[in-house]
Image (tube, rainbow, N blue to C red):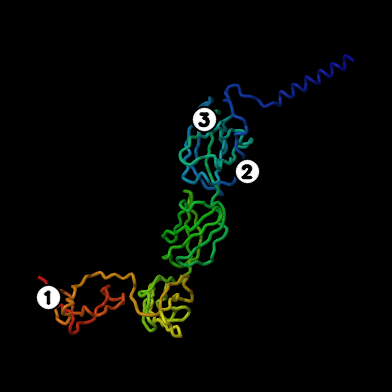
Amino acid sequence: MKAKVSSLLTAALLASLTSSALAEPTSTNVRTPRQKPATAEKKTVAPRAVAAMVQVTPLATHVSRSSSAQRFKDDIALRLNQEKIPLMLRVSNGSAGNQPFQWFRMRLNGELLLSEKSLKGKSEASIDVSGLIPNGSNQLIIDAAGLPGATMTWQLITYPMNIVSVEPAAATPGGTVTIKGTNFATDTNQVNVIVNGSVADVVSTTATTMVIKLPETAAPGSVNMEIQANGLPKIDVPVVIAGVAAPVVKGTNMWAAPAGTEIIISGKFFSKNPSENQVFFNNVPGQVTSAAADFLKVVVPALGGVASKPQAVPVFVVSNGMRSAGSVSFSIGPKSVDQNYKPSAVFPQQDTQNSSSAASVTSTGATFNASASPSSDPTSESGFPQQAQSQAGGVQINPVDLP
């Protein structure tokens, strides 16, 4: 019986000694500060290749100068809206052949962010800190201890924009391009787009879809659209710009005219070849007499039937086989010049008591009849409405030599 009790006591003693030997050793020469509950530490995610990430802050490196506890101070400065994007804190403790710190406590604005336990026994890890760092200046304090030469680095990184698709396959100058993917900015003010050196308009943006309006002056061909968002490095998105854009109709030089009158359609992206342009008045084509990239001269057609009053119809253009997205309203009826026209010169008022008598006015111009109706052709070389030649009964202007 005594032998059995002695055997049990011996087994218990051996078990106690084995348990003590396997317990994690504690450091006697390093003081560990009090810690907050482990719930304050952030979830560790699987490390990702550095090439697949984009840096938000430069790489910070700290090296131990002695065996005692040391404090390192850093700043994290986030730009506006960077606090809304996914953020990862990549920490490397003693990797690349360097000695690790025995322990470290990293605090952001006074709150515990992570410690050596966050690395789960590895030399490096990426910690998800999305939504934990406000924009502006933030203080990062690291308390750590390790042998002289121990090295630790950290860097704030994020996922880059990932482009999935670009539509359409070939866009036109002034047209829109829809880009789909992930990790896009959600504020149009934080997105800058450059195409062939010209700034493009960001129509809308979400985390997965971005709509961009190309510059109207974009040259045709395959180009790289440079996109920079949230202050991060730019990315290049290939896009094909077609050589011809859809025509755009801006207005007419008259708002009403009878059939058979030649009017001017202003706009852009017209063909310079008259035969490659069609102007429709309520689906009835007019005769295009001349063309330029920004205007067309066309004869107003008859709509058929007898109209008792002017007929307002939509006018649109088909150029290079493409129809204009919009149209302008035009009335086929009594002739009227552009209602927004304002003369830029003031002429002498004629005496209404004796309109048949001529008066002499000194000027450097040529003679003309002030009572004649001005032409509405805006393409005159002078830039002003042309005047008819002088006739009997008009105001006579005599040119003189200037001193």
Q: Residue at x 19, y 82 (%)?
A: 390
Mark closer to the chain start, 1 or 3: 3
Secondary structure beneath label 3: loop
Say if mark 1 contacts mark 3, CB within 8 Å.
no
**Neighbour tally class for label 3: few under 14, some 14-19, many 20 plus, Cα within 10 Å:** many
Percent across and percent down for residue 273 are 41, 79
Task: Give the CA separation, mark 1 to mark 3.
Answer: 95 Å
Percent across and percent down for residue 10 are 81, 18
Mark closer to the chain start, 2 or 3: 2
Image quadrant holding the N terminus, namely: top right
Badge 3 is on which residue?
64
Q: Which amino acid does label 3 sit on?
A: Ser
Task: Give the CA separation, mark 2 to mark 1.
Answer: 91 Å
Mark closer to the chain start, 2 or 1: 2
Q: In which quarter of the image is residue 101?
A: top right
User: Can you see residue 244?
Assistant: no
Residue furthest out toward the front? 353
Q: Which residue is drawn at 74% across and 21% down?
A: 17
